[in-house]
Image: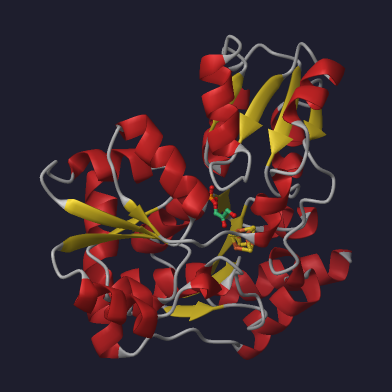
């Protein structure tokens, strides 16, 4: 393993490459990366890096976004099969048809979408800036939010903005909604609850927390929002409702705290496809390049840049 790590680091220097890894990557990949973060942080790093090659250890739409923002860089993903069930819930043809039937709507797309869907959108959002982006859209405009229904409902509740919401969801986060939140609160009464807005439970938790009990220890955050919260908190116990890959980084930040996943089964098999060996091959053979056709990339760049400027 050490030889592999040394070779990855050698190749990275030799080829002037940067390794970006999402918070859900396996620990070995997170430890090899130059930057670990959420979708927004990784897009920002891709936009500002001076490296010639970006090796994206995440899922395909994230590498695509990096390639759209930095078209002069070579963007690689170590496994082309690393997709996203949420991004698959809508394609460009479906969106075009919807727009034809509703021509007066502004389309706000979660970053978990293909480049073709982004190209048909007006704004892009990630889970950490969705509220700010929606607030920045004039209140007389009608909005279609896609594709995640739980994030959409959460953003709509917080901003008070009525929106049409696509009926999409992520298979990992949707299932977290099956876990009895109240039961876990009984087991860990002193814990802070950090919940990703893609979770099936996020909107109901939020509403319950507002209606039934004081909501001091329930927080809805993107993955990077969770990291920042833990960094600045004096709490010693946290229940985490998102993909369990994030626990590695959280434990590194606060080794003396206890972290409990709301559900042990919250594993994104796509995120786990990237391994150190595939990362090594990716750097060595410069595979698999993720490139977006020029006309699609040009159209998709606009909603992404709007998002980055509002953030
Ligand atoms: P974040 O933007 O919070 O990292 O979420 C991305 C994602 O795919 C969640 O499933
Ligand atoms: Fe997509 Fe869900 Fe995996 Fe995130 S956790 S990459 S939304 S399938």
The answer to whether residue 294 is seen in the rendering is yes
- Across and down, in percent, residue 264 comes to 85, 45
Residue at the location (58% across, 9% down)?
Answer: 214
- Across and down, in percent, residue 258 comes to 82, 24
Q: Vertical placement of 102 versus 115: above or below?
A: above
Q: Vertical placement of 306 versus 247: above or below?
A: below
Residue at the location (72% across, 83% down)?
Answer: 281
- Across and down, in percent, residue 226 comes to 58, 33
Task: Indicate how the structure is coloured in the image.
Answer: secondary structure
The answer to whether residue 24 is seen in the rendering is no
| Foreground residue among 65 and 285 | 65
Residue with the most extreme front position: 101
- Across and down, in percent, residue 6 comes to 77, 67
Residue at the location (65% across, 52% down)?
Answer: 174
Residue 235: image quadrant is top right
Residue 247: image quadrant is top right
| Foreground residue among 132 and 11 | 132
Image-based side of 179 in relation to 96, left or right: right
Instruction: Tell how many labels.
Output: 0
Image-based side of 127 in relation to 298, left or right: right
Which corner quadrant holds the C terminus? top left
Which corner quadrant holds the N terminus? bottom right
């Amino acid at each position: 393993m050490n030889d592999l790590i040394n070779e990855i680091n050698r190749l990275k220097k030799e080829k002037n490459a940067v390794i970006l890894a999402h918070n859900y990557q396996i620990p070995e990949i997170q430890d090899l990366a130059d930057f670990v973060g959420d979708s927004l942080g990784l897009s920002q790093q891709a936009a500002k890096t001076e490296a010639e090659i970006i090796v994206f250890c995440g899922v395909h739409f994230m590498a695509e976004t990096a390639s759209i923002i930095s078209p002069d860089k070579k963007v690689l993903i170590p496994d082309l099969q690393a997709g996203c069930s949420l991004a698959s819930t809508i394609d460009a043809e479906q969106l075009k048809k919807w727009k034809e039937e509703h021509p007066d709507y502004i389309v706000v797309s979660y970053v978990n979408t293909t480049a073709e869907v982004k190209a048909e959108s007006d704004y892009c959002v990630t889970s950490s800036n969705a509220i700010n982006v929606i607030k920045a859209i004039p209140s007389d405009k009608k909005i279609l939010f896609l594709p995640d229904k739980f994030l959409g409902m959460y953003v709509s509740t917080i901003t008070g903005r009525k929106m049409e919401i696509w009926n999409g969801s992520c298979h990992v986060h949707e299932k977290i909604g099956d876990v009895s939140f109240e039961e876990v609160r009984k087991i860990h009464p002193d814990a802070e609850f950090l919940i990703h807005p893609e979770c099936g439970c996020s909107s109901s938790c939020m509403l319950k927390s507002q209606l039934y009990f004081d909501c001091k220890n329930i927080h809805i955050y993107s993955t990077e929002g969770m990291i920042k919260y833990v960094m600045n908190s004096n709490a010693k116990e946290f229940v985490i409702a998102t993909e369990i890959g994030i626990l590695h980084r959280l434990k590194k930040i606060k080794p003396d705290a206890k972290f409990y996943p709301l559900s042990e089964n919250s594993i994104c098999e796509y995120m786990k496809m990237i391994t150190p060996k595939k990362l090594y091959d990716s750097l060595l053979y410069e595979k698999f390049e993720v490139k977006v056709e020029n006309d699609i990339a040009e159209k998709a760049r606009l909603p992404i840049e709007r998002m980055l400027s509002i953030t």
